[in-house]
Image (cartoon, rainbow, N blue to C red):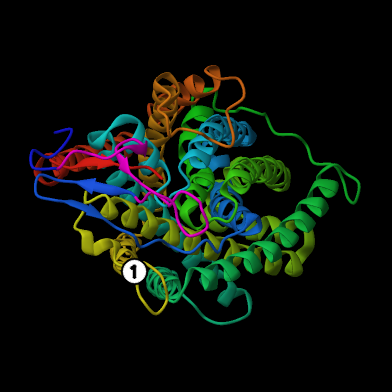
Amino acid sequence: MNASSPSSPPSPPSTGPDASVSGTNLDGEAPRVEPTVETDEATITDDAELERTIGLSGGLAIGIGTMIGAGIFVFPGLAAGNAGPAASLSFAIGAVIALLVALPTSELATAMPKSGGGYYFISRGLGTLAGTVVGLSLWFGLVFATAFYLVGFGYYVVDTLVEVGVAAGEWLVIPIAVLAGVAFTILNVTGTENAAKLQNGVVALLLSIIVCFLAVGGLDAAGVFGEPSTPERFAPHGAMPILSTAALVFTSYLGFAQVATVAGEMKDPGRNLPLAMVGSVLVVGVLYVATIFVATSAFGSDQLETLGETAMVEVGRHYLGTVGALAILVGGLLATMSSANASVLSTSRAIYAVSRDALLPRDASRINLRYGTPHVALGLAGGPIVVLTATGRVELLAEVASFLHLVMYGLICVALLALRRNEPEWYDPAFRVPGYPIVPILGALSSFALVAFMQPASRWIGLAIVVLTAGWYAYYARDVSLRGVL
């Protein structure tokens, strides 16, 4: 990788790393420094920016709405079957790791509030090779995660139809999931504000349903309403399944990082980004642990496993009869819908950011003049999502998504350590990680370590994607030098 193009003119004085700026604007303020990308042929400056339309509530809605779907409505049956009631500890481990990464991510996001999230931070902290691998891996990781959410949505639609007396077979799950993927892609093309309004409303209703259900289920399990349940052995399968289940369910915690992918559209990012990321992890982590307690109190772990992806419907029926089952079905529809919607948005922003840096063809970062959205990037997100959704492989989709995100999370922590060590002139975050450097070191180590507890197939697919992205760097992007941060 060349530091500069041989034919490039000398750089003028800068306020950031190789970012050109001179003079002041009409208000007497320094003009905004735009990100530039330097290649062996030319230096390109892209002045197009996405509008800042997302506030704190929107950031929390993206984080909570993305995470809450899988953790509460899809995973309890699978997780309890693997680890028993100790699945609650698996979710707690995932929350701790997520927090160890959310804090460094918050610092980097307030220093670089740009679309692209982890990719942007790593490319500026660790260079173009690491940025290319992470940027493209983030694209694929979000595609796998979104496909996982859409399959869950398909299951809940079919179960809802059956519950209200409409004959519907399991064969409908995949067609419904595919159609939903197309619909969410189209929705996001028509405007970020439209998608954010849907997300806010869905998450508000969803949280109301979940809190009421967990309150009733928790009191019932404790014997306040009925007979107290007999506790099952906490870890019937030992310690290793707890860690492997933590690796599986970590997909549930991908939402906080998706907030960072829309940092370029956040209002007051110095305040709202850390609050949205850390707050969403804390809220959802508590709800996950409570859900496993309620679910395993209703049924044994083995029975939950046989109930599969929609086990929570039967848990709702156990506590509240038909009303409880319908409430969970509605909640599951809303949760998987919000997860899929937020993930389509975040996937497109990852592609948009990588393309703006010329690590992908620049056409991928084109913005629709009518709607102000990156419509090409949304197409590149929606297409692969629909293809993977058609496979219907729930656990594999979830673990590959976790693998690719854990690699990114570990490197985010490493990027923070590198930037703090070098302290470039432009690095001025509004939020700094408490407990530095212990927190980012633990975040990096725990992220990389959790990969070891995944299924071999998931690790091989994830590793193959990382190798392919490195190959793309060698073929297409090795002569690109990233310049300018703000």
Q: Amino acid at mark 1?
A: Ile
How crowded pointer 1 is (Cα within 10 Å; few <14, some 14-19, many 20+) is rated as some
Q: Is residue 268 above or below residue 329?
A: above
Residue at 80% over, 41% down? 229
Range covered by the magenta-colored residues: 9-34
| Relative to 321, residue 35 above or below | above
Residue 298: percent from left, percent from top: 72, 48
32 within the magenta span = yes
Identify the residue position indicated by label 1 in the image: 367
Q: Is residue 127 left or right of residue 198?
A: left
**Image: 478 above or below 188:** above
The image position of residue 288, as x and y in percent, is 65, 44
**Main secondary-structure element of the magenta-colored stretch:** loop
What residue sits 72% from the left and 57% below the top?
210
**Left or right of 112, for residue 103:** right
Name the side, left or right, on which 166 lies relative to 476. right
Badge 1 marks a residue whose secondary structure is loop
Please tell me whether residue 455 belongs to the stretch shown in magenta. no
